[in-house]
Image: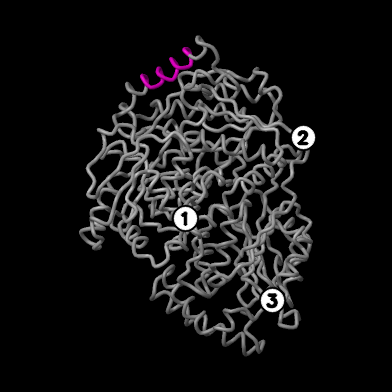
Amino acid sequence: MPLRIVCPRFCILAPVKIVHLNTYKENGGAGRACQRLNKALREEGVDSEVWINFSFNSGDTERVFSRGLFGRAVTAFGIIFERIVASFLRKKVPVPFSFPVWGRDISRHPALAGADVIHIHWINHGFLRPKDLAALAELGKPVIWTFHDSNAFTGGCHVRYTCDHFERECGNCPVLKNPGAGDWSHKIWKAKEQAYRRLGYTVIAPSRWMESSVRRSKLAGLHHVYNIPNTLDTQTFRPLPKGPSRKALGLPEDKFIILSGFMPSRNDLHKGTPYLLEALGLIISKYGVPREEVALLVFGNRDAKNVPEFPVAATFLGTIAGDDKLTLCYSAADVFVTPSLEDNLPNTVMESLSCGTPVVAFTTGGIPDMVDHLQSGFLAEYRSADDLAQGIQWVYNHHDRQKLGEQARSTVMQRFSEKVIARQHISLYNRVLDPGFADFQPVLTVITVVYNDVRHIERTIRSVTGQTWKNIEYLVIDGGSTDGTLEIIKRYAGRITGWVSEPDQGIYDAMNKGLRMATGDYVLFMNSGDEFYSPATVRQVFSASPDADIYYGETEMLGPDLANLGRRRHASPEKLAHGSFKYGMSVSHQAIYIRRALLQPFDAAYQLSADIDSILHAIKRAGKIVNTRRYVAKYLVGGMSKKKHRQSLKERFGIFSKHYGLLPNLFNHAVIATKLAWYYLVHRRTND
């Protein structure tokens, strides 16, 4: 049974009031995410409330800016007017694009006057224009903005696909009828730029994909950016017995039921419907799944007449208003398939996992943050209907679907439950309310992986918890130790942010667990037996230069008896680049601090050297890399890569060949062998 303890540092520092702003109440993913967060915060004792611009229910009058018949009529007119403007200026392409030609100034509203923190969510459709956002700056209050899509840092589009104009300045927009250097996208982009100069705000990116996009954007890239996922009501979205769920919905109990959501038309680009159609055909024609054993269940279709023809029997439920019925749908299904081509952190994926239903989806957007490939679902190759079909077939043929469902539910409870996400937000609220927040004060996530190492684990824990840098999130991932290690972890539980103790599939499976739990700006792996060079190390690293993508330094080697063996044989390079590892791993993972948005899960194909592959990928994506020019870590020799040295060398050779090419790697290894022989002759040890 996995155990996880969360440190009480996530308590709110003082009584504060959080005011959330969103255009609608629960229409769309952003509205639902906003309401769920508000509920989770209130359950943690935070004074939190949501104010919306417009409610489709005329009976909603509490915390609505548009009140009364006249106020509602004016706002409705503004929403419609924006759509009329869009119809004249935008091409007939399925790419959402907002023209902020209507809005309201709420800076003098009493609700904001009483707020300690203003938390913006989705504010399009005639709510807050750039100039209305700028007016909020006059309040002098901390502003946090959750980017539920890309609109905040583009010239109007909400979905970017392959367009990279946002990295420079928008203009020559492919979505507009009359693109040009000074087109509407450029004008909107410039208006936002001017507004953002006045409005200092902190960005929450619900997915690592969104975080990476924000950091690349010219409009928002210089703001503080934090990756905090959305949450959901895990008590409502919970696993229900499959048989009764199907009976309640009038569905056959002997079919393999595929659930999917919102199918407006065959040509819908954003939701990828054509790929689902093709994949359903392939599971029958190519992968041999009997047609009569499969049924498709679709919710969210607004028009029963405007739906495509599917190659399997399909049931259309239309729009589902209540979460209880939606929970029945997820619980009734064997798999949830979403062919979306670009999504931040889709609620439907999280809801399905929470109900214990595995998910098959493309590897895109924030979906990989939620779905663990071959654990809680299947991540298909982007835009490959064939791979999507293979994912469906994988679930169909899985020998233990119940275990799949349990793993799906566990994923949500560990990463996205109300308490976990609320406390991450509370931690950020505390930070923005701190008078020193404007300085460079990143959060470092330190991850320690351990299994049956009672001799060394306490030394590592004390090294991490003894750092003078206060912004450290410390996670310990234990593989189910039985030698007393777990008792030591529990002894320090009050100083550890979070810990897990459960069997794993190896060191990189454990490191991936830690990476999924991480919420800091940077990540460092300091495994059992390793330690920081001194109590001031983290402070010294971040003092070297602000806001780098990667920081690195030198490592000191420790023998089994903790004797100092000196510097590693591979000295850290003066300038770290992708080619710096061609003669060996010149920076150890204990000595490299990597921005979390740059990290990808460790490749499970490697058992001993996946950290090299991961670091090389991160270096390739990094911009600013800082050499701290100091010792930053002490590394205990004798790990698994030493115990299985031959296998480790074979993996390293394969990784270096992948990154540098086979022939150059052969030459490089000749150089490595020569240098190693000379080093051994001089020092009588290798110090790898």
Type of amino acid at the residue the image marks with label 1: Val
257 versus 447 height, above or below: above
Q: Which residue is mark 1?
A: 371
Residue at the spot 28% in from the left edge and 37% down from the top edge: 265
Residue 81 falls within the magenta-colored stretch: yes
- Residue 327 image point, x, y percent: 46, 44
Q: CA distance from mark 3 to mark 1?
A: 31 Å
Dot 1 or dot 2, earlier in sequence: 2
Q: For the residue carrying disc 2, how many other residues have a C-alpha within 10 Å: few (<14), some (14-19), or many (20+)? A: few
Q: Which residue is mark 2?
A: 15
Q: Is residue 170 left or right of residue 281?
A: right
Q: Which residue is mark 3?
A: 453
Q: Is residue 17 left or right of residue 570?
A: right
**Residue 529: which quarter of the image?**
bottom right
Residue at the spot 47% in from the left edge and 22% down from the top edge: 56
Total numbered labels placed on residues in the image = 3
85 versus 548 height, above or below: above
Q: Which residues are magenta?
A: 73-85
Type of amino acid at the residue the image marks with label 2: Pro
- Residue 329 image point, x, y percent: 41, 45
Judged from the image, the secondary structure of the residue bearing numbered disc 1 is: loop
